[in-house]
Amino acid sequence: MPVGIQQPSGQVKLTNVAYVRMKKGKRRYEVACYKNKILEYRNKVDTKIDNVLQIDKVYINVSKGQEASKADLAKDFGKDKTIEEIIDDILNNGTIQIGEKERQAALERTHNEVINIVASKLVDPNTKRVYTTGMIEKMLEKLSSETAHQQQEAKVERAAPENGEEKGKEKELPKWRGVTAKKDAKEQANWAMKALIAHHPTSYAKARMRLRVVCPTSMLKHAVKHTQKAQSSNDGADAENKPTGNVKDTILAQFERVEDQDTTGDEWEVTGFAEPGALKTLNEFIGGQTKGRGRVEVLDMAMIHEDD
Amino acid sequence: MPVVAPEKLVSLQNAAEGIRNICILAHVDHGKTSLTDALIATNGIISPKLAGKIRYLDSRPDEQLRGITMESSAISLYFSLLRRSAPEAKPEQKEFLINLIDSPGHIDFSYEVSTASRLCDGAVVLVDAVEGVCSQTVTVLRQAWIEKLKPLLVINKMDRLITELKMSPGEAYTHLSKLLEQVNAVMGSFYQGERMEDDLRWREKMEERLNAAAAERESGGSSSVLENGDSIDTTNTPAEYEEKDDEDIYFAPEKNNVIFGSAIDGWAFTVKQFAGLYERKLGIKRSVLEKVLWGEFYLDPKTKRVLGPKHLKGRHLKPMFVQLVLDNIWAVYEATTGGNNGKGDPTMVEKITKSLSLTLPAHILRSRDPRALLTALFAAWLPLSTALLVSVTEYLPSPPKAQAARMPEIIDDSPGADFVAPGVRDAMTNFNVSKDDPVVAYVSKMVAVPESEMPENKRRGGALSAEEARELGRKKRAEIARQQALANGEGSDIDSLTNSISSAAIGDTETETPEISEEVNTDAERLIGFARIYSGTLSVGDEIYVLGPKFTPSKPHASPEPQKVKITALYLMMGRGLEPLRSVPAGCVFGIGGLEGHILKSGTICSQLPGSVNLAGITMGTQPIVRVALEPENPYDLDKMIKGLKMLVQSDPCAEYEVLQSGEHVILTAGELHLERCLKDLRERFAKCEIQAGEPSVPYRESIVSATEMSPPKDPNLPRGTVVANTASKHVSIRLRVRPLPPSVNEFLNRNQGAIKRLYAERRAEEERHKTGADTPPEGDQDGMEEAEQLDTGKTLTLAEFKSELKAAFDEVKGQKEVWGDVIDKITAFGPRRVGPNILVDATGNSICERALRETPSPGPDSTQATEERKLSAHAFTDKIAYAFQLSTAQGPLCAEPVQGIAVFLEEVNIAIPPEEEAAPDRMGRLTGEIIKTTRDSIRQGFLDWSPRILLAMYSCEIQASTDVLGRVYAVITRRNGKILSETLSSTSSASTTGNQTFTISALLPVAESFGFSDEIRKRSSGSASPQLRFMGFEMLDQDPFWVPFTEDELEDLGELADKENVARRYVDKVRRRKGLLVKEVLVRDAEKQKNLKR
């Protein structure tokens, strides 16, 4: 054997390592995993620990190969814990590095979810028909690329701020920059809808909810009172300091289109279409005003055109 | 040849005897368009040299590119004939107007054939001499048979027998006679089919009469009158079935209805022609020669007498057809292109020309191209156009004759035939042309023509006058303004402006300049009706009624009431071009303007409304089956696309367009090729934007079953499907149980969604009056509403009926009486969308839900708190729970698709609001959200406690296939997870041509697997099997998507990870992935085998 060359014998080299780190006690523990597998383990998609873990040891520092001492582990995790349990604890609760593929999959999932939510809630105001997910996707893509374009322009303009009036108008519109995996899909979908409606008010609108409000007739003519006041006084007598109108008008004001109004017996009932946002307001209003004797029912979450 | 002026054609339209309306039908690539070329060349529209190559009537670029015809197109041709009425009389010139319709041969466009054939009186059916009878040949022959068109057979591509197959004349003769037999066999099968039907009808009639007579005899007793009547009876009906003569339907060369020819080389002949040629030479009478020239007749070389096969006496002679006809043609080929390595034999050519006494121009004789010589020789000797046109004019009927024969039957077949006014019937059959007679015309299809090609917009030539120049300037200014408007993005103005421009363009005919017409070209497509007039005379400006295909004369004013429409223009169809006309007499095929928006696809136009006839009620031979979803590439173009689609549907008789509930725009086409054409049309003409086609999204349903092997319930203390859940604030706890609905009930609910919908509507109106809600029995005042509903739902039930039938459905279930016995009265809601096949049952001890009580809340079981609060809860929560039920049934836990067939029993709702929180102002709002969420989650949980199933949307599929392709059809169906239901041998099918038996296979096919199915079937069976798909409903895939082997046996058999793919799981995951739901799937199967990023 030639002199001077040392063969690393008995040395295990780990490649494609993803660390999971957890602070316990005063020490930081690490385990070495394969990339793209930790989330699957947490989601219980892949239950085989061998497929996730590179080596069943707990380290203080993986890259240096420093193993955690048994005493430390016992001290920090509890004496009766086996090494498997400790590893499981670290895998499930430690901070992880998300692999490229995992990130991509998560982003795709959020993206699809956002698109689906938007597609189910937006309609063409002219035909009351929904758009396909494909159309929504394309439209959002267009919007985000436009936004990016505008930003570039804005940068140029900031360098030479001359025509500021035009820019002001553009700024009001909500901007859509594409889906991120960080935020909740619902939240992003709401933002996307806002942006779409703002940019193309003629071709996109939120689908209306179909609501039914039932209210005792005796209360219809009552003037609207403050909720706090309603709690303090059990009859609606002290309404004079809030002369905004009676209960009926307030309810009707929330509706965009009233389909049917009917008084039967001692109950008054109205069915109609309202913006999705109106539901919350109505619910609170009715709850506060009628003390539970009136109610709001959702007949349809989103009214879309249907073929019979 | 001189160009025939359109004026001449127009003048000929009035001479009905000289009109022939023919269509050219054949299998794809049998040479229809090439044949038409030869005819067009006679009118000088194209050069005779190019005839057969240019394919003039294939005006679309893609038709030229692919070399197949896709749209039928018409052209009017002039033909004059010198004919002697008597042998010694002076030949007099007869002029003919031939309206020729060239139709496509591909199976995807067979609807074009059916529309074209109704316009015509006669058909020219082409058969490839080599390929013989093909599938589409049979179809077109049947079409001609159904439409009662007189067919003329052309055996085309005879040159292939000589040059490709290198047959000897004798072989060719046997081949041809076999071919003829094939065609006649097809014709015979149609005849047989009809004969059998007739026979059956006749038998029925006889039986009826016999029965009637017998009955009379019994009742009449012993009267002598009866005897008399009986005898009359028997004399009235022929005792024997009358055999119709089937002689005239067959093709026979001696009857002059067979033409042999080669369109590409420009020659054709009939036996008659040759008889004329040989009359003098052989000294045999022409009429005799005509009869013996085809068939087993031989010419005795010594005696020059015609011999039958009996008199051959062992001599080996050629049949006369071979000797006199084919040998000569073969000799010409040999002389020109055959011998001397394909260069021809000049001496032989000389001999032939001399013997035929033809003179060929010297430059052709010297030309190096043997084909030029060949075509020139044939053009002089046996020109194709003469043979064809002479036969057409002599053999095929003129409109008056054809109508007299065809019309009575066509009218009788039309809907409401009994109500057709006698005047109309008479005018149509007797071909009355005068102005006063009723006008009846049939519009077979709408053709989209670019605005620029309209004759009004063609430049007339000549310099512009000052006024015209000013006009032009005005237009230019308008255009500039328009462009500015475009630049400013003021979308709303553009439309009106363009409209004004295009209307101006249509308005003045003289001042058009090329630029403007180009401008218009980009804007508009005009729809022109492709029509045939049967009686009366139609002029521009006439007001006529347009009858839709659903019109029936028995109810002329039924909605939609036919409109009166003014004819804005009439055209002579000249292939690519149109020639404006002032008026059209009966018997013509023409184009008609002004019907845009009035006729969808096809229709009848008539001058009177009551008593008119509907000719458009023919059923299409092919149903569109290929479904694709369309999407514009650029989302801004959606409106354009929709407009384009509507236009396309109008102009294409076979394309259909629908919008799905998911918002998809789906078109249905007859085949892949048809689809391609439709897309091209959309992109380039109608929508003018990029369009993508894709797989339409497929609906699924979710359900549960009680399977024999299920994993144990999640909570061992509770019965399966039961969930107890607390809201996040721990104030309300809900206990509910999910159960699968019995199949009978499920099916019943599915069937009666309309009824449930109506019940809801009624109940909403009535529930306040009757506090018990939907339990109210139906009352008299509901009837009107019911009737109105019945119109659109078809079948609805009254509440009582509904209840009793539902009860019957529940009663069908055995062994679960205690569960379902009293459920009906406790049903609180249906879902999803309040009409679906799932029920929410109120099984709480005190019935807190809507149905039982609403106004008088009873205290709950643990009611120790203030009654006011209790009341509030009872009110508030039931509708929240019902809403949560709707939500959870609309989006099931498997892949967020609608659920069907579950019952949710609400068992308990407990409220424990601590008194100190009661006063919180937002309590209600917060609780609402909590309750909805909790209920929804627990319903899902309960759902998954059972064995979940996914239901696939299914097509029921019918395929007719002959035995030789049966195996391949099966292979395709099984590969696509289809299920064969039955196969039956259909013995009377006329589709079988070769004596093969035809099977009818009915199968179920998942919609998800149907994309490209029909095309695959067609391809694999070489076009002889074509499926009919019809949406059937949902069918359960009996496999748990979450199933993994868990019993010992299964583990042993299949291993820990089941080797076999879980099909249900695959469908579920596909949908989940599409919707962005979490898919339980490993991203990296073998983690250690990932690509090593370092080193």
Image: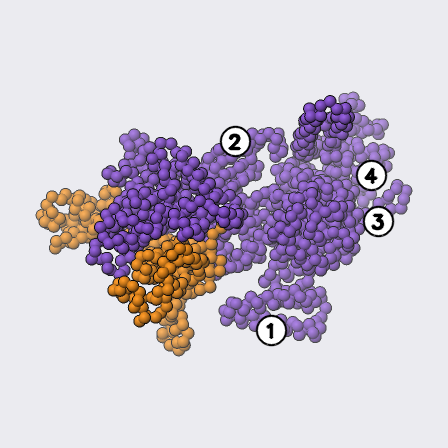
Mark 2 — residue?
B983
Label 3 vs 4, first from the N-terminus: 3
Mark 3 — residue?
B93
Cα–Cα span, label 3 and label 4: 19 Å
How crowded pointer 4 is (Cα within 10 Å; few <14, some 14-19, many 20+) is rated as: some
Q: Circle 3 — which element?
A: strand
Q: Circle 1 — which element?
A: helix
Residue in the image at 68% along x and 68% along y:
B511
Residue in the image at 63% along x and 57% along y:
B596
Mark 4 — residue?
B276
Q: Chain A appears in which tint? A: orange
Marks 3 & 4 on one chain: yes
Asked if B266 appears above or below A221 in the picture, the reply is: above
Question: Which chain hosts label 2?
Answer: B
Mark 1 — residue?
B477
Relative image position of residue B400 (x, y in whole percent): 77, 46
Question: Which chain hosts label 4?
Answer: B
Name the amino acid type tagged 2. Glu
Relative image position of residue B434 (x, y in whole percent): 78, 53
Q: Is residue B921 left or right of residue B518?
A: left
Cα–Cα span, label 2 and label 1: 70 Å
